[in-house]
Image (spheres, rainbow, N blue to C red):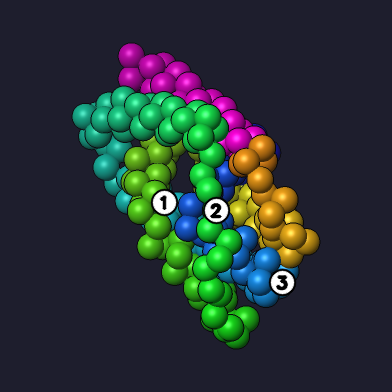
């Protein structure tokens, strides 16, 4: 179950960054209610899962080369530390959410597809999976197929739980998401990114040195 919680926390570190998907969730929940917002979140969870699987499958073929593992070790650790620092900066100066953007009426199926598309098109998600996804794989070599399934299950469940919570808060009055809560999200994300930076560096140190 350790890999399940590792995947859960890794996904949560991505969810806590209030990017385009979270803004779409909050706007939809505020203007259209819980269910449309939730379906956007579920769609985005599938988009994130697609990137996670793709990054792990792609990187696994490259890990036979020692130089690639070194790049993933040092590069992944550096990117995680940089993301942790970015979250600290956002904690000091929280993002302002634009609540006034119009949310078009869509079918529930289109809400789901829209959420998946937002996740797949997010620049931060692409960077996140291209760097951190590979680094986590490199730090988890030797795990069984069953263990990786648990990792992905935890990763996916975190996205669903996060989507449900944010959609509920938005439907109940999204302006509860004030600067104080956003600072809390940024702090939690910074802590998680720092934790994974230490984990990737520690595992790489013992594996490669």
Using a 10 Å C-alpha cutoff, classify the residue at mark 2 as few (fewer than 14 neighbours), some (14 to 19) or many (20 or more).
Answer: some
Instruction: Residue at 66% x, 71% y: name it.
Output: 31
Q: Which residue is mark 3?
A: 33
Q: Which residue is mark 1?
A: 125
N-term-proximal mark, 2 vs 1: 2
Position of the C terminus by quadrant: top left
* Helix, strand or loop at mark 3: loop
Of residues 40 and 181, the one nearer the viewer is: 181
Q: Give me the C-alpha separation between circle 3 and circle 1.
A: 26 Å
Tell me residue 19's x, y (percent): 48, 52
Q: Give me the C-alpha separation between circle 2 and circle 1.
A: 19 Å
Q: Give me the C-alpha separation between circle 3 and circle 2.
A: 18 Å
| Picture layout, residue 31 above or below residue 26 | below
Q: Which residue is mark 2?
A: 97
* Helix, strand or loop at mark 1: helix
* Residue 4 visible at all: no
Tell me residue 104's x, y (percent): 54, 80
Tell me residue 100's x, y (percent): 56, 66
Main SS class of the magenta portion in the image: helix
User: Which of the 4 quarters of the picture holds residue 76?
Assistant: top left
* Helix, strand or loop at mark 2: loop
Which is more foreground, mark 3 or mark 2?
A: 2
User: Which of the 4 quarters of the picture holds residue 205?
Assistant: top left
Residue 115 is a magenta residue = no
Q: Which residues are magenta?
A: 183-209
């Amino acid at each position: 179950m350790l890999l399940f919680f590792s995947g859960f926390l890794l996904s949560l570190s991505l969810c806590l960054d209030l990017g385009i998907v979270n803004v779409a969730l909050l706007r939809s929940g505020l203007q259209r209610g819980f269910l449309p917002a939730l379906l956007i979140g579920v769609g985005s969870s599938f988009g994130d899962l697609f990137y996670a699987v793709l990054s792990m499958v792609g990187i696994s073929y490259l890990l036979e080369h020692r130089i690639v593992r070194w790049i993933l070790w040092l590069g992944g650790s550096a990117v995680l530390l940089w993301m942790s620092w970015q979250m600290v900066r956002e904690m000091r100066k929280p993002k302002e959410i634009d609540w006034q953007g119009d949310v078009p009426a869509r079918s529930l199926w289109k809400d789901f597809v829209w959420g998946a598309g937002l996740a797949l098109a997010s620049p931060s998600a692409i960077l996140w999976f291209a760097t951190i996804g590979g680094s986590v794989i490199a730090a988890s070599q030797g795990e069984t197929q069953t263990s990786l399934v648990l990792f992905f299950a935890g990763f996916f469940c975190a996205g669903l739980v996060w989507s449900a919570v944010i959609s509920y808060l938005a439907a109940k009055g999204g302006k509860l998401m004030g600067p104080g809560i956003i600072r809390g999200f940024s702090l939690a994300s910074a802590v998680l990114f720092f934790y994974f930076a230490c984990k990737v560096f520690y595992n790489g140190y013992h594996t490669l040195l």
